[in-house]
Image (cartoon, rainbow, N blue to C red):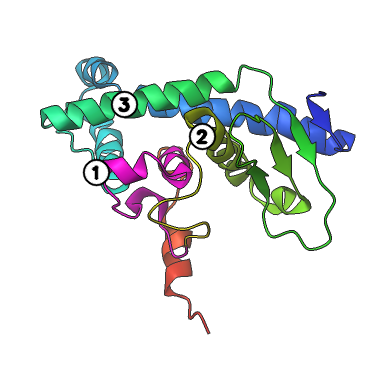
Amino acid sequence: MQEYTGFNGEALELIRDTNIPEAKSMLDRVLILTNAHTNEVSKRTLGAMVQPQIDKTRFALRHIFGILCNADMQPEAKVDELHLNKLRTNYTKIRSSFDAFFPKVFLERDNPAMAAWVSNNLSDPTVNFTKLYFDLSEMDQAVTLIHERAHTILRIPGHPGTGDSPVCIVPNQGKKLGFDVASRNAYCYEWLATSLHPNYDPTPYEDACKMPTH
């Protein structure tokens, strides 16, 4: 099977040269910022200036995955240590998957409901795309790829605790699902990667939640 099927040259280049490198960068950032040793070294070197980023990471971990860490990014309890190690293992698997071949297929549909999806047969690594994908921001395109690869690589079908179309979500606040549920929901991997991006701003998400729904 070809790596890219059905894309025009511009769309192919966007995914290959912009979105995939950005997805890799976002996953690398998650792994760096959730590493207690790396944060310890940063605090010794840079002092208090790194604390705001550590606190942002702690906040997102607590609200998205239910993992509690102290001000040095050390897990507060044994269960938190186990959950953080499991989470980092999962992110490492997702990150490694972007260095492997996986088919990408563009499907021309008149009124697509989704920007991208993978098969419920999780042994099929294909990521399918529609025109809606190209209406997303570049950050959202990258985290969409992270989301879909999480389904396949971690073998987590569906979206337990949120359904397929969660509404009124501020990424760094998550849905407070607890680790067992959150670690099986691809949206949670997407939300943490979004929350730790240096350009992340919760304001548009918070404003969207305030808008009337009727």
Q: Which residue is mark 3?
A: 86
Q: Secondary structure at mark 3?
A: helix
Q: Which residue is mark 2?
A: 150
Left or right: 162 in relation to 126: left
Q: Earlier in the sequence, mark 3 or mark 2?
A: 3
Q: Secondary structure at mark 1?
A: loop
User: Where is residue 69, by image quadrant?
Assistant: top left
Q: Which residue is mark 1?
A: 66
| Residue range of the region highlighted in magenta in the rendering | 167-193
Q: Earlier in the sequence, mark 2 or mark 1?
A: 1
The amino acid type found where label 1 is placed reads Gly
Front-most of 180 and 71?
A: 180
- The reply to whether dot 3 and dot 2 touch (C-beta < 8 Å) is no
Q: Position of residue 151 (x, y in %)?
A: 53, 37
Q: Residue at x 26, y 33 (%)?
A: 54
The amino acid type found where label 2 is placed reads Ala
Q: CA distance from mark 3 to mark 2?
A: 14 Å
